[in-house]
Amino acid sequence: MTVDKIYKDKSGNQPFRFNEEVAKVFPDMLRRSVPGYAASIEAIGALAARYVLADTNCYDLGCSLGAATLAMRQGIRRPGCRIVAVDTAPAMIKRCRKLVAEDDRQFARDTAVEVVQADIRATNIENASLVVLNYTLQFLDLQDRDAMVQRIYDGMNDGGLLVLSEKVVDEDPQMEALLVDLHHEHKRRNDYSSLEISQKRAALENVLLPETVAAHRDRLRNAGFASTAVWLRYFNFVSVIAIK
Ligand code: GEK
């Protein structure tokens, strides 16, 4: 795994981009920066085994290198399914296609995977039994999020499941400060320096726009989801499941 040294000696304050440099170190970056990431991927596999029905579609929206796609593919127990993995970043898509091809070679799985370079806001969603937004909605403009979640709901079958993982902000400023501090301490334990942490934080300003857990659950309810639950929380990193 290539080690993430992107903010080690970078000066200046360029906004964060999902480019080649990031795609190359992405698994290491997520492992060291997103508390609970591995648990979210593991759960997506387990949920695929339970919720994906025969002859339906699954969507991995903002797939990056396809970790959730591969977990779904491994978890699916039914025939005739198709996974659509979507990302706008060409560097991610290129590597994702290679990893899916490698999975094909190793395991010859039944479930087809389509890796598509596109904006998830323009992706058609239909006949879906499982939709995954694993740390992706946070990168969409705030005003686009209601419509995105509504389109997902409309494209899902009854009984289908959405996994929504996000970095969130706490309503209570004192708790928010504590949770951010705990996250930074976690990153320091994972060998990021204070300078790297502060530079990454500045680069993500206005790129990653977190909302509260309540705002996410309200949006899901307003779209029509009958049930929602937080199934994972680690500092300010939360994963919610919603059932249609
Ligand atoms: C994982 N889900 O490993 N349309 C398509 N893709 C987008 C858009 C958009 N409008 N905006 C951002 N992205 C993955 C991790 S990373 C999370 C997801 C993170 C893509 C962007 O290019 C990037 O690949 C991904 O969303 C977010 O489970 O880096 O914190």
Image: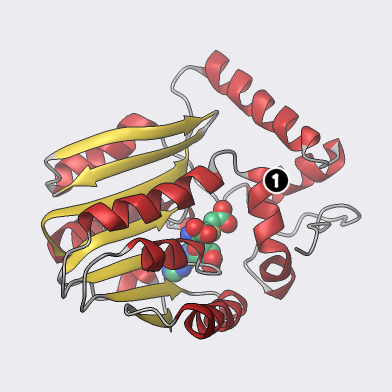
State the residue at coordinates (55%, 28%).
Answer: 235
In the picture, the quarter occupied by the N terminus is bottom right
Identify residue type, mark 1. Arg
Which residue does the numbered mark 1 point to in the structure image?
32
Q: Extreme front residue here?
A: 107
Residue 106 at what x, y percent from top left?
Answer: 53, 80
Above or below, comparing residue 77 to residue 207 in the picture: below
Q: Residues within 10 Å of mark 1 (few under 14, many from 20)?
A: some
State the residue at coordinates (17%, 64%).
Answer: 53
Q: Which image quadrant for residue 48?
A: bottom left
Q: Tell whether 203 sits left or right of 133.
A: right
Residue 123 at what x, y percent from top left?
Answer: 30, 75
Above or below, comparing residue 135 to residue 85 in the picture: above
Dot 1 lies on which element? helix
Q: Is residue 207 visible?
A: no
State the residue at coordinates (73%, 64%).
Answer: 25
State the residue at coordinates (58%, 83%).
Answer: 98
Q: Which image quadrant for residue 166?
A: top left
Residue 148 at what x, y percent from top left?
Answer: 28, 60
